[in-house]
Amino acid sequence: MRVPPRLGLAVGRLVGRLVGDVVITAEEVAGLMQNLLATLSPPSGRTALSHWVLKHRDTLGRAYSSELARRRDRGRAYEQLRRRS
């Protein structure tokens, strides 16, 4: 889905406030705009994202793990930092 970079960043900041995390940064948006996420090399894994999503569809999106919470408390596992929806 295409959105203007400024709009994507603004929505990311709004969502970040709602979940208490940084969802996306201006630097990440700039990298995406420069196609730094894409590669011409062959896949390094064997599992297609579509297959993984189908396998995990019952639990996908049910919990959120904050990266900022993880940085503040490196002793706890992501599972312990999750917020259930």
Image (spheres, helix red, strand yellow):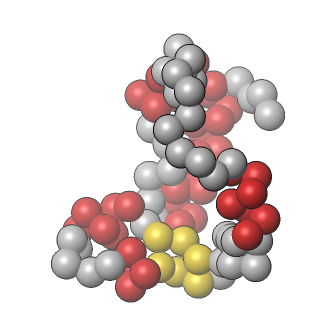
Nearer the observer, 74 or 45: 45
Going by the picture, which residue comes out furthest to the front?
46
Is residue 71 found left or right of 85 in the rendered image?
Answer: left
On the rendered image, what quadrant is the C terminus found in?
A: bottom right
Is residue 71 found left or right of 33 in the rendered image?
Answer: left
Residue for point 38% across, 61% down: 67
On the rendered image, what quadrant is the N terminus found in?
A: top right
Is residue 67 visible from the viewing direction of this image?
yes
Nearer the observer, 56 or 7: 56
Is residue 30 visible from the viewing direction of this image?
no
Percent of width and height locating residue 78? 38, 75
Q: In which image quadrant can residue 70 be found?
A: bottom left
> Up-down: is 23 above or below 25?
below
Nearer the observer, 24 or 41: 41
> Up-down: is 55 above or below 15?
below
Percent of width and height locating residue 16? 52, 56
> Up-down: is 79 above or below 9?
below
Nearer the observer, 61 or 19: 61
Percent of width and height locating residue 66? 43, 66
**Count of numbered circles on the image:** 0
Percent of width and height locating residue 82? 47, 79
Going by the picture, which residue comes out furthest to the top?
34
Residue for point 69% across, 78% down: 59
